[in-house]
Structures are given as C-alpha cells and as structure tokens.
C-alpha cells in the first residue's frame, strides 16, 4: 500500500478489529482468526482506495448488472457474495422487532452513530441507545448466532435491509450534524449494496429494484448539493448539467425493472418522485402536480412528518404558496419545516414573518452549509 497510505491501513485494521468485536462474541472466534482479520481489513482498504480514486464518479463500478465476483473466504454465507450485505442479513434476525433490527443494523453494520440513527429514525439518542442494549440482550437470550441465514429465508428479511440502506444513504446525502452537508462514503456504499440486493437471486424483487432506482437517481445530485462557496444548494438552484447522467440512466433502468411486480411499495413511489426530478429539463419545468399526487399515495403508506413536509412543498410548487403554507405540518425542532414556512411566507409578501422563521431555521440547522443557506435567506429579506 505504501508509506503514503498509512492512514488507510490504520482505518482498515481498525475496521477489522471493530467487526471482530461486534461479531465474535455472538458467532465465536473463527478457526483462523488472523486470516479472517486480514481478509476483512484488505476488503476495507480496497473499498477506501476505490472510493478515493473515483470520488463521486460511481457509474464505472455500478453499471454492470451483476455484482463482481469477490473472495469468499471468511464470509458468513457463501450464498451471499458480499461481506457487508451478508452481515446486514445476519443482524436483521426475526428474534428482533423490525424497529430493533433496523437500529441494530445501522449501528453494527452501516457504521452510523447513535445520534445519526436518532436523526434518521426521528427519535431521541437515549431511546436509540436503549434499543441497542435491548437488541443485544434479546439476541443473547435467544442464543442467536450472528451469521447469514440460509438462502430460502433471505426474502423475509429483505425489507428490513432495504430500510437500513435507505436510512444509511440519507445520512450520507444530508448529514445530521457537522461541518459537511454530505458524506459520500455512506451514499456510495448504500447504492452499491442496494444494487447487490436487487441482483441476488433470493432478494431480487420489484421493491429491491425500486430502492436501487431511488438511491441511484438521488445520488446523481450529490455533486451539486453544496455550491463552490460552501452554501447548501436547494434542488431548484442546482446546476443540472453537473448531475451524474450515468447514475440517472442506471436509476431509470432499475425503475423500469421495478415495474414488473404487482405491488406498489413506498420504494416505487419515492423512486418515481426522484425520476421526475432527474428527468425535468429545469426546475421550472418540473411536473409538480404529479409529484404532489404521488406524495398523496405515499402518505397513505408512510404517514410520517417527513413525507407530510415534502408533500406540502410539492403542493406549494404545484398550487401556489398559500396552498403550500396551508398544507405544512407543524414539526417541532425541524429546520426544514421552518425554512419551508419562511419560503412560502416570503413568496406571499409576509417578509417579517418569513424572517422570523428563517432565523429559527438557522438556529436549528444541522450542518454549516445549511446555516449559511439560511443566513443568505435572511440577508435577502433585508434587501
């Protein structure tokens, strides 16, 4: 790897040790622990170097319709040819409730912190920490071995895995805290694993293709999430010629494959919305009435504050600021809710009220690029 890659080597070794600490107490020490650690560290190092070399240019590795063949020694199940995907299925055990499975997977496999998980699952960090303790105790009490399940039971765990990948991607696309708005490494890995899920013979399904479509289409916008000045860029302000056209094509291909099923899932609806954004020639030409109608359907399946907020924004763009303002939910502590309210009030000429909401959004902003965006909004109100 070379002297210039010491940090990468240290990261890879630390990752392997953390994986061992998480897994061996449940599964037992493998017959050749040193080989197991070497393989996991090597795979981690290759992932880090691959991500570093390509940045956000994901398409070259993601375009093939079948996952690459990789070394299988040290894996928990040879039926799954990806270490991380196998581990996701391992921790999503039916001994746990779906909520506990997702929480445990995000912490032990996806690498999210407790505060990050809390932000993604709209919970409190203390409650998330308690869930993790409860999950470990339940697995220990049930005598569960953390190993990939046999192929025939993979489909019943797939929805939990899809949810975990979606939340992992969201943390990368819109960080819950810190100086950076995006953490591309989470997005890269979530897209890769979603595509592997859609291609494995036991987990391929319209829902898996729809998830892969959603993540690919959304990841295409990563290069324009933050402007050159370090300010977060809203969808309407992003230069669309800088979106990754290869990822858009990949997402649309998955979306087309997802239409083969009879069931309409949340992943299909979210992917369809992402496709309408990705294929609109400009922000002004976006089909907002169709997006608002899809959000109506999505709300029937997922009545969450996040969906209600997104639906209100779509209504505001389709029917005008007054309609959007009337549809906005009241979400305590949400910078996005406050910012949306400020935008609609500003468009209605209620400048002083808008300023108050932008100020609140700035105080609540989770990352520095978002704070800068709200500061810019406030400045525009004073001009």
Image: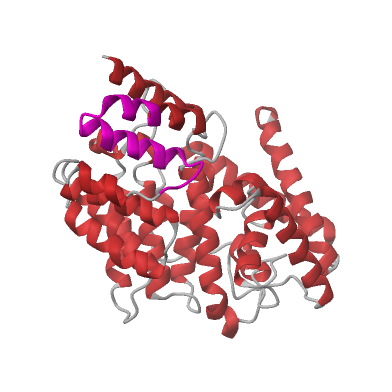
Q: Quadrant of the C terminus?
A: top left
- In which quarter of the view is residue 84 placed? bottom right
Between 187 and 308, the residue placed more toward the observer is 308
Q: Which residue is drawn at 50% across and 79% down?
A: 202
Does residue 311 sit above or below 80 in this rendering? Answer: above
| Res. 277 visible in picture | no
Residue 128 at x, y percent in the picture: 68, 55
The one nearer the camera, 1 or 350, is 350
Q: Where does residue 250 sit, x and y in percent of width and height?
A: 32, 57
Tell me how the rendering is colored: secondary structure
Is 366 placed left or right of 277 in the picture?
right
227 sits left or right of 52 in the view:
left
Residue at the (63%, 49%) spot, across then down: 112
| Residue 66 percent location from the top left of the image | 43, 66
Magenta-colored stretch includes residue 341: yes
Residues shaded magenta:
330-357
Residue ranking furthest to the left: 285
Say whether residue 19 is left or right of residue 81.
right
**Looking at the picture, how far across and down is residue 81, in whole percent?**
58, 67
Magenta span contains residue 54: no
Image quarter where the N terminus lies is top right
Q: In which quarter of the image is residue 13?
A: top right
Q: Is residue 235 in view? A: yes
Residue drawn at 49 percent across, 37 percent down: 53
Q: Farthest bottom residue? A: 152
What secondary structure prevails in the magenta region? helix
């Amino acid at each position: 790897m070379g002297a210039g890659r010491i940090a990468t080597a240290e990261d890879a070794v630390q990752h392997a040790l953390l994986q061992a600490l998480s897994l061996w107490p449940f599964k037992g020490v493998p017959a050749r622990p040193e080989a197991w650690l070497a393989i996991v560290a090597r795979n981690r190092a290759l992932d880090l170097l691959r991500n570093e070399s390509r940045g956000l240019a994901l398409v070259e590795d993601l375009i093939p319709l079948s996952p690459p063949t990789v070394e299988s020694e040290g894996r928990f199940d040879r039926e799954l040819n990806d270490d991380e995907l196998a581990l996701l299925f391992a921790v999503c055990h039916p001994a746990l409730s779906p909520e506990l499975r997702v929480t445990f997977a995000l912490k032990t496999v996806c690498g999210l912190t407790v505060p990050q998980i809390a932000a993604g699952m709209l919970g409190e960090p203390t409650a998330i920490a308690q869930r993790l303790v409860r999950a470990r105790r339940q697995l220990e009490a049930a005598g569960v071995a953390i190993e990939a399940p046999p192929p025939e039971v993979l489909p019943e765990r797939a929805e939990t895995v899809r949810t975990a990948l979606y939340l992992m991607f969201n943390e990368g696309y819109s960080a819950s805290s810190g100086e950076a708005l995006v953490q591309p490494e989470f997005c890269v890995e979530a897209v890769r694993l979603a595509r592997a899920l859609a291609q494995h013979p036991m987990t391929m399904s319209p829902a898996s293709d729809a998830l892969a479509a959603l993540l690919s289409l959304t990841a295409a916008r990563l290069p324009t999430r933050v402007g050159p000045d370090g300010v977060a860029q809203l969808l309407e302000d992003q230069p669309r010629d800088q979106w990754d056209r290869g990822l858009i094509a990949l997402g649309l291909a998955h979306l087309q494959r997802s239409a083969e099923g009879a069931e309409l899932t949340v992943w299909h609806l979210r992917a369809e919305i992402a496709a309408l954004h990705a294929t609109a020639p400009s922000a002004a030409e976006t089909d907002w009435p169709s997006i608002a109608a899809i959000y109506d359907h999505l709300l029937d399946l997922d009545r969450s504050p996040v969906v209600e907020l997104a639906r209100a924004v779509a209504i505001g763009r389709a029917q005008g600021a007054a309609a959007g303002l009337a549809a906005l939910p009241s979400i305590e502590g949400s910078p996005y809710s406050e910012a949306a309210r400020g935008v609609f009030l500003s468009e209605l000429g209620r400048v002083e009220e808008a300023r108050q909401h932008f100020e609140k959004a700035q105080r609540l902003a989770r990352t520095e690029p978002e704070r800068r965006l709200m500061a810019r909004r406030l400045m525009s109100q004073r001009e």
